[in-house]
Amino acid sequence: MELLKTILYILLYPGLIYCVIGGLILSGIDRKLLARMQKRIGPPILQPFYDFFKLLGKETIVPRNAAKKAFLAAPVIGLISLITVSLFIPVFKFSPFSTYADLIVVIYLLTIPAVALIVGGSASGSPYAGVGISREMVAIISYELPMVVSLLAIAKKVGLALNNGVMTFSLAQIVEYQAQNGPLFTKISIIPAFIAMLLVIPCKVGSLPFDIAEAEIEICEGPLVEYSGAPLAIFKLNHAIKMLVMTSLFVTLFLSGAGTGILVVDALIQFILIIIVMFFSITLLKAITARLRVEQTLKFYWTYPTALAFLSLILVYFGL
Amino acid sequence: MGYTIPIGPYHPSLEEPIHAKLYTEGEVIKDAEVFIGYNHRGIEKLATERNFIQTLTLVERVCGICSHSHPFAYAMAIENIAQMEVPKRGQYIRVIMAELERLHSHYLWIGLACHLIGYDSLFMYVWDARERIMDILEEISGNRVNYGMVIIGGSRRDIDDEKRKKILNMLDDLIEPHNRMKDIFLNDKTAALRTKGVGVLPKDVAERMGTIGPHARASGVNVDVRKDAPYSCYDEFDFNVPVLNEGDVWARVVVRVLEIEESIKIIKQALENLPEGPINLGNKLPKVPAGEFTARHEAPRGQVVYYVVTDGGQTNYRISIHVPTFKTAPTVPYMLKNNTIADAGLIIASIDPCFSCLDR
């Protein structure tokens, strides 16, 4: 029975099926909202599904000078790691795979899709991919620092209350803290980290103005330039799921609480919160900015979000 | 580590085929070469086998965007060889069309520049404004792209009083989207980050390379055929030629924004003072003696030159078309140097290239 439940979790709810459907619907909503803000009608909400299944049916072409195995494995590795992250993120108090330090696992696993993009791009042997890879690396360097520091601030804040002052890296405990004391974004010391994480999301999911690695009109989608057919479909799916997972992690970290205890209702509330977070961090930003250059991205992330994250950490140590 | 990165002939940031080779170190472009000639259609040769009215249709198809400038310049050349006096009303209508074309061409390019820096919302707003211009063009000529408004000796279609008022109203409606677009572009931080100081062309280099049109005017070179050598009836209108000194992509956008305002001024003056009288000298095949003439017209992208030779027969002996992109394209390798790959597409596009004109 336990085994069956575990398999259901992996395949159905926070796992595969939910990730695919939720991610694609989320990106459909994103496209529709963006279109409305740009005075366009926009595609139907289900358009990402049509795109995905159409791409699955297309011919897969592997370039002659590509490293075939790495080229084909990269998108799948990215997909698997993203689905694994989704398993670890609690939906309010529902956390089937909760462990002592799942936050650290999440941080590591969230980097793997970007690494998969780098591996796939370098395996394809195209100069555009070469430029895209170097940009993706700079992007990782830019956003990891503010992200990790703001996570540390949260870990310390929760640890002070629940773990005798030792940092806690358990997502279940972070949710527990919010169930007792209200959502974390209402705490003064966490507000800077809240803003920093909100700014990290667009770069992490690679959307405007930080979609430097895949800038289609500058370097023809960079690492994806040689991909076609099913691997490309999976990379596009990765992109959608990354959006879902990042916003979902954000909701769990800052907007969580006790919930209602009924899984279906909790999941729905979670998804609505995800859409709201996505609107402010991804869609709205996409509509009002131009794409930044690589060095501008690095400069941006190492100034404002990093400063905010450190400010948050210091405030937490002062006990605010 | 050095890469050689090809931009074009097929590339998402290019609407038409050109090939640029970028020699890069990391993200920085150290050197660049530009290759042209992917779009040759042999129009100059074809023109020698057609009569003068057929040639109008042909040269209208040199370019999809300046499809009024080319027949305008060609008709001026033939009229001068044949010593024809074009009626004032016909000339006014030609000028109105030419300025409307400048509006829609400039809006098109500004929108494209926004798209190239990844600012798709502004791109949509700009093209919304452009769509109103297209409506006006359709109102006058019945067409959105190839207007067919020029015949030898005048204009083909008249603008009656009802249309005149309607167009003036439509121009007033344009002010609001235009000002909003201008406001966003001038005040947006990310747009400035991507365009200021990018692809700089200093004044002395611009003069040495002989560049023309808005591209030169953004680098501080004051050249405009409409002012320097007034033709048709341009000397009867009151307008300025905006010149900026920055020489970067930002200045190129702003110069065009300002030019749009000047063009609206010209169109309003022309519509309000539209003279009475015939619009052309009758739609018949003109008798053209042997002779030659060089006609110049300020197209949206710069000066278009038509050198036409006739031998007294029914066809052109030779026509030679000089287009603005041929003058602006040589500046591209200079502008690309020491910029990043991220800006390459934008810099190539910043000359407002028209490769169908360029290769003919």
Image (cartoon, rainbow, N blue to C red):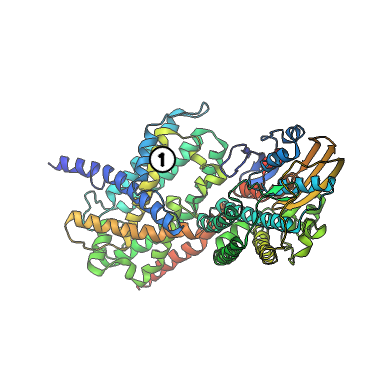
Residue A204 position, x and y percent, is 43, 52
Q: Is residue A152 left or right of residue B298?
A: left
Q: Quadrant of residue A33?
A: bottom left
Q: How many marks on residues?
A: 1
Q: Is residue B191 left or right of residue B233?
A: left
From the viewer's side, name the closer residue of A178 and B278.
Answer: B278
From the viewer's side, name the closer residue of B128 and B5.
Answer: B128
**Quadrant of the image containing the C terminus of chain A:** bottom left
Q: Quadrant of residue A54?
A: top left
Under circle 1, the secondary element is helix
Callout 1 environment at 10 Å: few (<14), some (14 to 19), or many (20+)?
many
Residue B39 visible in the shown view: yes
Q: Is residue B244 above or below residue B339?
A: below
Q: Which residue is mark 1?
A: A235
Q: Quadrant of residue B134?
A: bottom right
**Quadrant of the image containing the N terminus of chain A:** top left
Residue B201 position, x and y percent, is 73, 54
Q: Is residue B282 above or below residue B230?
A: above
Question: Which amino acid lies under the numbered mark 1 shown in the image of this protein?
Answer: Phe
Circle 1 chain: A
Q: Is residue B328 left or right of residue A19?
A: right
